[in-house]
Image (cartoon, rainbow, N blue to C red):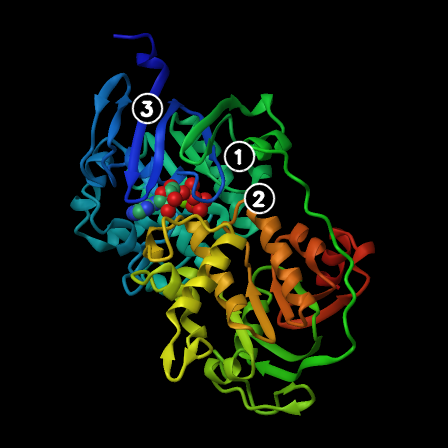
Amino acid sequence: MHSSENEYVIEMRDIVKTFPGTKALDRVSLKLRKGEIHALIGENGAGKSTLMNVLTGQFYCDSGEVYMEGKPIRFSSPKEALKKNIVLVPQELNLIPEASVAENIFLGNEVGKGLINWKLAEQEAERLLQILEVKVDVSQPVKNLSAAYQQLVSIARALAYHPKVLILDEPTAVLTNKETESLFRSMQELKKGGTAMVFISHHLDEIMEQCDRITIMKDGCLVKEVPVSEITKDQMINLMAGKEVKKTQRVKRQVSEEVFLEAQHLTRKGEFEDVNFRIRKGEILCVAGLVGAGRTEIFKCVFGITEKEPGGKILIEGKEVPIKSPIDAINQGMGYVSEERRHDGITPSMSVMENMLLPSYDKLKKHGLIDWKQAADLTEEYIKSFKIKTASRETLIKNLSGGNQQKVIVARWMAKGIKMLILDEPTRGIDVNAKGEIHQLIRELADNGVSVVVISSEMEEVLALADRIMVVHRGRISGYLDDVDLVTQEDVLKVAFQ
Ligand SMILES: Nc1ncnc2c1ncn2[C@@H]1O[C@H](COP(=O)(O)OP(=O)(O)OP(=O)(O)O)[C@@H](O)[C@H]1O
Ligand SMILES: [Mg+2]
């Protein structure tokens, strides 16, 4: 027996995992202590989720060992890991939409088997959600809840297994500030109870605040393991990237005076009221506001996903156009990247190329046939410029890391050649470096005359990108900030609340 027996709850040693065409993990080690919050960071595709999937029995590794409290373990399914109280909250939500909140929390839970009595199960579900400071009716279908609340339900389900080891794979990507804080409070409580946690996030500030130690990965390799107190944010970024990283700088842009789209009196009862705005050609309009202010709803309506009430109008280049469905919007030259890539973004069982070119096939047709050579070239071009990590363009998109899937969806509309693009939280789940690259691509798009709407809850992103900021509060436009160079975060908040 070696001395680490009591020191570490989990020790992963020299883990290797290959997928066809990709060495996802190359002799990676991870040591988890009891009662610590351990950050796992790295760029999109670095291997973070894969490492955690090996730990929880989702994948076998090709070689390497895992020890729990000093004893070797090897799980052949997530069920076996759960029996040892090792619980993963996956990066992609996997709830059953039609089932109730309580059912989602307890379905398949051996521990909860005794709870045939659903009344008891519901009470227990409420209690678990309370730990996360969530109060909802647990008998309603989970699909009624916002993405943020669904994420918290998925964490509550993990808590029902009394985790000794709790793995949270990018839990905060869909959470608002308030919910993030609740989650952090619960994590600190779990920590006191001795639970070891692995926390995966691209938000380095969160990591600095909440975590004890950090493991940094790059291209499937371990780069460094270090206590948070001994590293700075810049050092983390440089280690993840393997090079010195330039800060993304705000760029002052010239925008034409020509208006592309004008919205007049858009209303949907209960969502937003009398919304009027204009967006110019080549302008980057950032839409700020609190989560739930109605930003997503407004632009779903502009894109024809939802219907506007009578009296509302959309004008394109000065002429009123009927937009009754997304097809109409696409025909008018618009594109839309939803904040929910899991639901309405990717087609999982299609290739990277198919997912990227889906709306562009028309453009790629020659005499009625798709020009596959051109399609392949175009795909390769975007894989390169977006630095999409994929074995090939034929790889199924579901086999890409979360952040790389997001890049494919953003590239999709750029490939189509559009006149206006609506992006809802485009860099969610995207690593710090790639974020800067996507910002650059958005600017290039705008430089080519495309009007870009960016809905973002990240103030830094808004301030870096916007030519103009539109602030939405409680379903109304509460103001604009024109001279973004002089704007601070406080200014935006002031407008939001006035
Ligand atoms: N099921 C799979 N089949 C083939 N390749 C895979 C599969 N799962 C992951 N990969 C590949 O393994 C590598 C690591 O992916 P992983 O999902 O672990 O990255 P990650 O660090 O979690 O990234 P992100 O921050 O984007 O979530 C990627 O190149 C990915 O394409
Ligand atoms: Mg991942």
- State the separation of the CA atoms marked 2 and 3: 27 Å
Q: On the image, which quarter does residue 103 sit in?
A: bottom left
Query: Is residue 303 placed above or below 253 in the rendered structure?
Result: below
Q: On the image, which quarter does residue 286 sit in?
A: bottom right
**Which is nearer the N-term, disc 2 or disc 3?**
3
Q: Amino acid at mark 1?
A: Met
Tell me what residue is drawn at x 24 percent, y 32 percent. Answer: 62
Disc assigned to residue 14: 3
Is disc 1's CB within 8 Å of ligand 1?
no
**Which is nearer the N-term, disc 2 or disc 1?**
1
Tell me what residue is drawn at x 31 percent, y 50 percent. Answer: 123
Q: Is residue 241 or residue 171 the one in the foreground? A: 241
Residue density around tag 3, few if under 14, some if 14–19, many if 20 or more, within 10 Å: some
Residues at discs 3 and 1 in contact (Cβ within 8 Å): no
Q: On the image, which quarter does residue 2 sit in?
A: top left
Q: Is residue 102 left or right of residue 274?
A: left
Per the image, the residue denoted by label 1 is 240
Is disc 3's CB within 8 Å of ligand 1?
no
Per the image, the residue denoted by label 2 is 432
Q: Secondary structure at mark 3?
A: strand
Q: Is residue 10 or residue 316 the one in the foreground? A: 316
Query: Is residue 259 placed above or below 4 in the rendered structure?
Result: below
Q: Is residue 308 left or right of residue 282?
A: left
- State the separation of the CA atoms marked 2 and 1: 9 Å
Q: Is residue 45 or residue 23 the one in the foreground? A: 23
Disc assigned to residue 26: none
